[in-house]
Amino acid sequence: MHTRFDCITVKSLRATAAIALAATFAGAAHAGTLGTIALGGGTLYLPGTISNAQVLTQGGTLAGDGIVEGPVSLDANGTLAPGATAAAGTISADSLVWQPNGVVHHRLGANDGGSDHTDLSGALTRSGTGTYHFNFTDANVPPVPGASYTLMTFASQTGFNASDFDYSYTGANADLVGEFQLNATSLVFHVISTPVELQRFEVD
């Protein structure tokens, strides 16, 4: 007997359960029909590909190094966290609607290749007015001055300006300074400076 899930609501989920749920949902959804995974809490860690589903981060976290073959909504109090547990990586999706107070966690390394990414085959869309926040931390090594990081790629974007984004940083260089650049198909973060240790000079 074939079982169809139109909506799965997740309030608290361990990683092992998330893998089983995602695999079950992908297999059960009717071809061409989008079901909904609503994350009310906990973390759904992408094990690979979720097909025929839209994911709503309603207070929960969508994480991992995988693919959502459908739209993602980053709701208020929701979190998007691309990358594997122990290494940087990429979350791919058809599109992303970002609401105020939704947070994206990205790890920044020595270069763009060693950092997290969000890759959208379709549009990045702004919903509402407020804060669109990135929480940066270190990947295998801390970010370096002068490096540029492509945080998101997309086919198009609606409603955003570079000034709409802000960030916090919890890595090794607590006073990291950078700026966002919004292009037609990407959102980039440039590191301007990191703390410089003061040196002692003696004058004769």
Image (cartoon, rainbow, N blue to C red):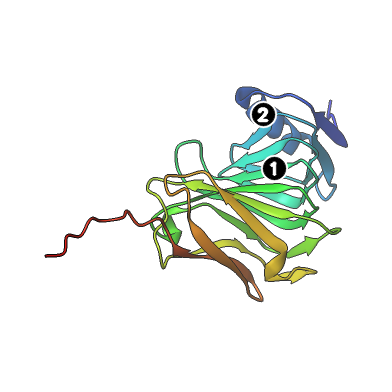
Q: Residue placed farthest to the left in the image?
A: 204
Question: Please, is residue 123 above or below residue 131 in the view?
Answer: below
Residue located 69% across and 68% down the image: 163
Query: Closest to the observer: 108 or 83?
Result: 108
Residue located 55% across and 44% down the image: 65
Residue 76 position in % (x across, y down) = 80, 45
For residue 142, the mark is: none
Query: Closest to the observer: 35 or 204?
Result: 204
Query: Closest to the observer: 9 or 79?
Result: 79
Residue 115 position in % (x across, y down) = 47, 53
Q: Secondary structure at mark 2?
A: helix
Q: In the visual, does 159 lie left or right of 150? A: right
Q: In the visual, does 39 lie left or right of 121? A: right
Mark 2 residue type: Ala
Mark 1 residue type: Thr
Question: Please, is residue 14 above or below residue 32 in the view?
Answer: above
Q: Which residue is mark 1?
A: 79
Q: Which residue is mark 2?
A: 18
Crowdedness near tag 1: few (<14), some (14–19) or many (≥20) residues, C-alpha within 10 Å: many
Q: Secondary structure at mark 1?
A: strand
Residue located 57% across and 66% down the image: 179
Q: In the visual, does 19 lie left or right of 96? A: left
Lower position in the chain sequence, tag 1 or tag 2: 2
Q: In which quadrant of the rendered view does residue 114 lie?
A: bottom left
Residue 130 position in % (x across, y down) = 80, 56
Which quarter of the image is occupied by the N terminus?
top right
Q: CA distance from mark 1 to mark 2?
A: 16 Å
Question: Please, is residue 181 above or below residue 132 in the view?
Answer: below
Residue 129 position in % (x across, y down) = 84, 59
Determine if residue 155 is in view. no
Q: Residue placed farthest to the front in the image?
A: 204
